Amino acid sequence: MIWARDYNISSPKTLIAGIARDNRASYAAFRRRVVVGIRDEKPYVVASAVSPLDTDGDVQAQPTRQYPNALLFEDTIDLASCLDFVQDVDDGLIHIGDLEIASSRDHRQWAKEWVPTQNNYMVGAGHVISTQFSEDGRTITDSPLLAPRQAYYPDLAEAVRDWLLFPQYHGRSDARNGEVIFLLPETRAYLADAFPTKDLLTVTIAGSLVGQRELVLNGAWWENGEMRHFEEAT
């Protein structure tokens, strides 16, 4: 389920900076993970996800996993470096480890999605900002990832499933293949859960603003062919 989607994002860097500013209490740093495929000695993005870390302490990044046909990369970056990465993606040229990876597309089209608590991208509600960076990422090969002292994967799809930890991932047919995705959870106020019981719906609201600001819950439901609306202070 997706709340809203916008395919006409003209300034992704400004958008992500604004979301990070609004959630600054919970965006201490960012984890960047990229699965890179290598075909005919040319690297390409299979899939990538950048998400905030909710701790100010040092977080040890997973060591890079290097294979003849792939690279599994992770590092931690601050907000300034995250925004620089957004710009590099938009410009069509990124650096992952020692690799320089150029986009296979002349222009980037960015999309923004507001997703609810249950979604296919991350744990919790929030914002998903993405763009297709590599057309090669759409065609995942069957070749296994095998190298001395490295974790074994039967193919790139299983590497993406394990490395990026999407709640749901559909392998070769997943529309996120070839994309660079920024996963930005909403931490100010959001619906954490809902429990229907007969004629009563009990919702749980969580976030840093709960108890600090007056919040209003607005929604609707269908009953006997008629839409009914509600707006209640929490």
Image: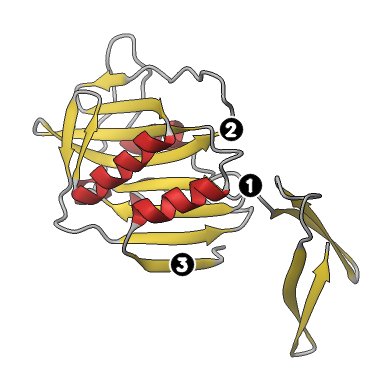
Coordinates of residue 204 in the picture (x, y in percent): 80, 53
Color theme of the render: secondary structure
Residue drawn at point x = 59 percent, y = 44 percent:
123
Coordinates of residue 4 in the picture (x, y in percent): 51, 68
Taking the view exactly as shown, the residue that stands out farthest to the left is 40
Q: Nearer the viewer, residue 123 or 29?
A: 29
Q: Quadrant of the C terminus?
A: bottom right
Residue 33 at least partly seen: yes
Residue drawn at point x = 20 percent, y = 49 percent:
91
Dot 1 amino acid type: Thr
Does 44 sit above or below residue 9?
above
Judge the density around disc 2: few (<14), some (14-19), many (≥20) Cα neighbours within 10 Å. Answer: few
Residue drawn at point x = 61 percent, y = 39 percent:
25
Dot 2 amino acid type: Asp
Q: Quadrant of the N terminus?
A: bottom right
Q: Is disc 3 placed on a helix, strand or loop?
A: strand
Q: Nearer the viewer, residue 200 or 185?
A: 185
Query: Dot 3 corresponds to which residue?
Result: 5
Query: Dot 1 corresponds to which residue?
Result: 187
Query: Dot 2 corresponds to which residue?
Result: 54
Residue 175 at least partly seen: no
Taking the view exactly as shown, the residue that stands out farthest to the bottom is 225
Query: Are discs 2 and 1 less than 8 Å apart at CB?
Result: yes
Horizontal placement of 157 versus 93: left or right?
right
Does 1 sit above or below residue 129?
below
Does 26 sit above or below residue 76?
below
Judge the density around disc 1: few (<14), some (14-19), many (≥20) Cα neighbours within 10 Å. Answer: some
Dot 3 amino acid type: Arg
